[in-house]
Amino acid sequence: MNPAVRVRGLEKHFPRVHALRGVDLEIAAGEFFALLGPNGAGKTTLISLLAGLTRASAGSAEIMGYDVVSQYREARRNLGVVPQELVFDPFFTVRESLQFQSGYFGLKHNDAWIDELLEHLGLTDKADTNMRRLSGGMKRRALVAQALVHKPPVIVLDEPTAGVDVELRQSLWAFIRSLNRQGHTILLTTHYLEEAETLCERVAMLKEGRIVALDRTANLLKAGAERRLELELDGPLPAFLTPRLKGREGERYLLDLPDYGELEGILAGLREAGVTVREMNVRQADLEDVFLSVMGRPPEGALPSPPAPLPEGEGSA
């Protein structure tokens, strides 16, 4: 069975930028996959190549086994892209935009699916509203609907929740999860690393046009796991804990904790030293920690983590 997305030796040169440098990547059908990287890493360039918006300088890319250049019609029928920018036609209503989008793919009787999209994305009461009159969040919902109107097996979400409200974020992820359970392949780029950690089975990290990390999310978290014991004490740090000290934030000490089994001994030592613990927290590495470790610096344009997506089965789709 062909992978949903296959990229081999992909290169892209612009006049002053070498955007992609020999990218190799396979995404299996039905995966929920994250492509992460700082601004300028090449994520949007890679998506543009998959969508046929630009040509590669070298290498090849396939969607569901179809080459994006020599078999572009089939490749594009199998792909839906939600762009990062708010691009829309200001002369049509939401429903008219979706009907025109259906026509581009030769779908003449698509009203039932359009109605379902409008309902799932909270656009039913905006169906007959002109696109230019929608708020930014509603425009984002309409772009998601346009990308899904031809029921593509592969869905690319390029920063889909940037600048949108919590309600949209929750309803969008509930709907996208349901599509993934039905077999759709999801490729997500996001600066909200908590979203990627919660939703995605595998993660690739792109830096300066190269993939520098690629593994299952759980494996990346395990490999980058550096536990920290955060202690706020009613006195100075006892000498026996000095070798574990990794830093200090105000009155809070940050200690290395390689194994949970060592916690009991630390607490016993504090009792013997007559030091009372005011507050304690064990911090496990998350995907943001792994990302920063791999990249070696903070991600440009990184955003504060939003509220975590709702657990499956909660919230309305």
Image: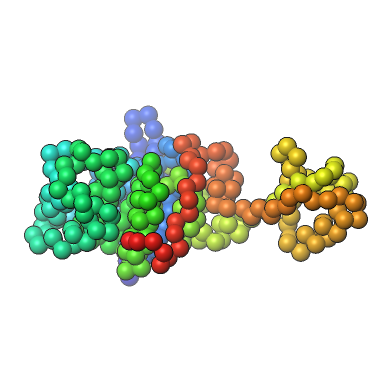
Residue 261 visible in the snapshot: yes
Q: Nearer the viewer, residue 249 or 152?
A: 249
Residue placed farthest to the top in the image? 16
| Residue 91 shown left or right of residue 221 in the figure | left
Q: Is residue 294 above or below residue 223?
A: above
Image quarter of the C terminus: bottom left
Q: Is residue 136 above or below residue 226?
A: above
Residue placed farthest to the front in the image? 125
Q: Nearer the viewer, residue 196 or 219?
A: 196
Q: Position of residue 132 (x, y in %)?
A: 20, 38
Q: Position of residue 189 (x, y in %)?
A: 40, 48
Report how many numbered discs are placed on residues in the image. 0
Image quarter of the N terminus: bottom left
Rendered image coloring scheme: rainbow
Residue at horizontal 64 percent and vertical 55 percent from the top: 284
Q: Position of residue 178 (x, y in %)?
A: 34, 65
Q: Position of residue 213 (x, y in %)?
A: 51, 52
Q: Quadrant of residue 271?
A: bottom right
| Residue 188 shown left or right of residue 198 in the figure | left
Q: Quadrant of residue 249?
A: top right
Residue at horizontal 35 percent and vertical 50 percent from the top: 168
